[in-house]
Image (cartoon, rainbow, N blue to C red):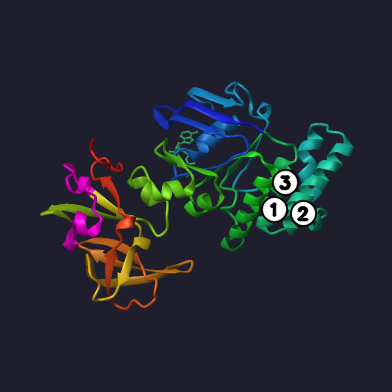
Amino acid sequence: MAEIKLKNLNIEFGSFKAVDNVDLIVKDGEFVVYLGPSGCGKTTTLRSIAGLVKATSGDILFDGKRVNDLSASERNIAMVFQFVSLYPHLKIRQNIVFPLKARGVAKAEIARKLDWVTEVFKLGDDLDRYPGALPPGARQKVALARAVIRDPAVLLLDEPLSAIDEQFREEMRWELGHLQRQLGVTTIYVTHDQREAMSLADRIVLMSDGRIVQVGEADQIFYNPVNMFAGQFIGSPSMNLIDLRPAEGGLTLGASGVHLSPERDGLPVWAMNSRRPLKLGIRPLNVELVDDDHQGPSLDIAVDDVFSVGRERFFTFHLGDQIHQGVDKRKTVGSTGRVRFAPEGFLFFDTETGRRAAPEV
Ligand code: ATP
């Protein structure tokens, strides 16, 4: 097992910068998930750690030792990709022990290791079957078993579950997290699926355009996003963003005309006095339906649509030409409703820079 350190890592393809000045420490035994939209540089970063892509500049260190100039096979890493490549003509047991046989490991040691991964991955029933007889989820488990059988220092996983049916993916995700904790192997996992990231990661590394936007536990990014991108990328349904307009003694919410004041509505005084235009970020869970006679800032809306995510029911509505989402906890919404914007869910962003707005000092 190893601690991985990336120092000022830059990776360029011609004039294009795929990874831009990345600094990161992945702790020994940690499960870190690289999350971000397609093309943001996740796979390139992973491949550079694996030794499959050369860093243009910067350092990659395993336990303090610079590995930039080591080949992939010298780095003691194991990598599993989206599409599994098992040998179809070999039984599962032969597939799993292949990396050990290739290295000339002694028979008794191979048998011991096979017993170990068979137990950990619960593969006993499948050992004498051929890959073609297994569903994709089970094949991916075999690929993982083959990856860890030689005790790699680092496990690198690139969207390993995305080719698996949704129905099995959830189960595999749970199993993968459980296995990683059991094995304690330092793991970096790449995905563009925020649900996957939130359920697996000790820490999430959120990337955009080759740069790290934010590093933290899922909850930290969810409750404390550093900018609008982080706020909107994490959390489903996505965070609402509403323009705030200056008004006498407070601010109004976009086109709604709903007035927020510091005394009554929990609007911070610094936000009211901000000289820069702000947007309110508020998660759908904090846009709640209230009774018609609700006291305090609320707004009558026309409901456009209703949908469910897990056990929660959400609805969409318009403010001007912007679509927003709220939660229907009582599951009673009809074609109209009255919503309240809960101040405990207020996040403020600088409209121009996108960054989280803070009191000016
Ligand atoms: P995805 O989930 O789509 O794979 P990603 O975040 O993993 O996205 P990368 O595969 O790391 O993104 O790619 C980052 C950028 O670098 C993309 O614009 C991609 O086209 C570019 N890129 C990657 N490899 C090369 C290469 N060998 N030559 C040129 N450009 C490349």
- Camera-side residue: 45 or 251? 251
Across and down, in percent, residue 334 comes to: 32, 78
Task: Please say if 240 is above or below 330.
Answer: above
Q: Quadrant of the N terminus?
A: top right
In this rendering, which labeled residue sits more in front, label 2 or label 1? 2
Under circle 3, the secondary element is: helix
Choose the circle earlier in sequence order: 2 or 1: 2
Is the residue 104 above or below the residue 97 in the image?
A: above
Q: Position of residue 136 (x, y in %)?
A: 66, 56
What's drawn in magenta, residue-wise? 252-278
Q: Is residue 52 visible?
A: no
Residue at 49 percent across and 23 percent down: it is: 58
Picture coordinates of residue 144 (x, y %)? Answer: 68, 46
Residue wearing tag 1:
139
Mark 1 neighbour class, 10 Å CA radius: few under 14, some 14 to 19, many 20 or more: many
Marks 2 and 3 in Cβ contact (< 8 Å): yes
For disc 1, does the CB lie below 8 Å from ligand 1?
Answer: no
Of residue 6 and residue 129, the one placed in the foreground of this image is 6
Count of labels in the image? 3
Q: Earlier in the sequence, mark 2 or mark 3?
A: 2
Residue 239, picture quadrant: bottom left
Mark yes or no: residue 61 visible.
yes
Q: Amino acid at mark 2?
A: Leu
> Would you say the beta carbon of the disc 2 residue lies within 8 angstroms of ligand 1?
no
Circle 3 residue: 145
Earlier-in-chain disc, 3 versus 1:
1
Of the residues shown, which amino acid type is indicated by label 3? Ala
**Residue positioned most to the front:** 263
At label 1, which amino acid type do we have?
Answer: Arg
Q: Is residue 90 magenta?
A: no
Question: Image point 51% across, 26% down: which residue?
Answer: 55
Residue annotated with mark 2: 123
